[in-house]
């Protein structure tokens, strides 16, 4: 049985050294090229969301989302 998984990330930018963070994570899975299941979560990056005109995520949507931890932390997010 063949299948696939697709991971989609939306970020505040592309510069790790500029403290850019992930603000949305999506996972799509399915067999034989058909989407069978999906999962998504918003992440509060605790900073400006950057190019909102591109990812269409605004600060209000992320306000109550899980908070991104520091990039050096072993825990990727904390509630």
Image (spheres, rainbow, N blue to C red):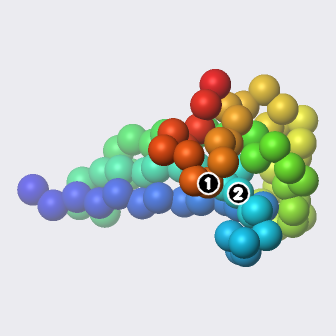
| Label 2 sits on residue | 21
Q: Position of residue 44 (x, y in %)?
A: 75, 40
Q: Using the rendered image of the protein, determine whether residue 24 is visible from the camera's viewpoint.
A: no
Q: Are marks 1 and 2 in contact (CB under 8 Å)?
A: yes
The residue at the far left in this view is 1
Q: Position of residue 23 (x, y in %)?
A: 71, 50
Position of 36 with respect to 78 (left or right) is left
Residue at x 86%, y 50% (from the top left corner): 47
Dot 2 alpha-carbon crowd within 10 angstroms: few under 14, some 14 to 19, many 20 or more: many
Residue 12 seen in the current view: yes
- The one of 30 and 61 positioned closer to us in this rendering: 61
Checking the image for residue 42, the label placed there is none
Which corner quadrant holds the C terminus? Answer: top right
Return the residue at label 1.
Answer: 71
Residue 12, position in %: x, y?
78, 61
- Among the 4 quarters of the image, the one containing residue 32: bottom left
Judged from the image, the secondary structure of the residue bearing numbered disc 1 is loop
**Left or right of 65, for residue 63:** right
């Amino acid at each position: 049985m063949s299948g696939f998984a697709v991971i989609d990330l939306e970020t505040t930018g592309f510069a790790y050294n500029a403290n850019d963070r992930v603000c949305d994570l999506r996972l799509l899975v399915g067999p034989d090229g058909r989407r069978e299941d999906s999962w998504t979560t918003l992440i509060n990056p605790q900073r400006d969301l950057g190019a909102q005109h591109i990812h269409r995520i605004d600060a209000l949507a992320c306000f109550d989302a899980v908070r991104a931890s520091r990039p050096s932390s072993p825990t990727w997010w904390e509630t």
